[in-house]
Image (tube, rainbow, N blue to C red):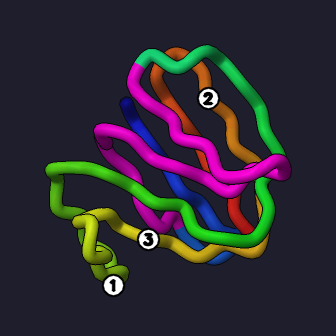
Amino acid sequence: MYLEIVTPEKVVLKGEVESFSVPGINGEFQVLNNHAPVVSVLTGGFVKVTTNMQFETSVEKDADNRYRFAISGGVLEINNNKAIVLAD
């Protein structure tokens, strides 16, 4: 699945990922390949990205080998195996 994480300042990450999880208003949820189309409001927390690719980012991987991006809120849109996180 293709994922973009975008803030008002810059595109933080874009590329193919295996899966990712986001902090939804009813709790954290994971998104896998071929997920149904959805638009969801996000709360403060971490976007956790699992991938075999190396991204040019200053964000380090955690102990579970996932990239972790802190957000204070935002919106997630998924459609046709493409996900966009518009983060605050």
Q: What is the crowding at mark 1: few (fewer than 14 residues within 10 Å), some, or many (at least 20)?
A: few
Task: Locate residue 68 relative to residue 66 in the image: left or right.
Answer: right
Please name the residue shown 39% across and 52% down the image.
Answer: 14
Residue neighbourhood size for the residue with mark 3, other residues' Cα within 10 Å, grouped as few (<14), some (14–19), many (≥20): some
Q: Which of marks 1 and 3 is nearer the N terminus?
A: 1
Q: Tell me, yes or no, whether the two marked residues, 1 and 2, touch with CB atoms within 8 Å.
A: no
Circle 1: element type = loop
* Cα distance between the residues tagged 1 and 3: 11 Å
x then y, percent, for residue 82: 49, 29
Numbered disc 2: secondary structure: strand
Whole-number angstrom distance, CA of label 3 to CA of label 2: 19 Å
Residue plotted at (33% across, 84% down): 58
Horizontal side of residue 84 vs 11, given as left or right: right
Quick one: label 2, few (<14), some, or many (20+) residues within 10 Å? many
Q: Name the residue under label 3.
A: 68
**Amino acid type at mark 1:** Ser
Q: Name the residue under label 2.
A: 78
Q: Mark 1 points at which residue?
A: 58
Say whether residue 43 is left or right of residue 51. right
Q: What residue type is labelled 2?
A: Ile
Query: Residue 46's image quarter?
Result: bottom right
Q: Which residue is drawn at 31% across and 63% down?
A: 66
- Does 49 sit above or below residue 9? above
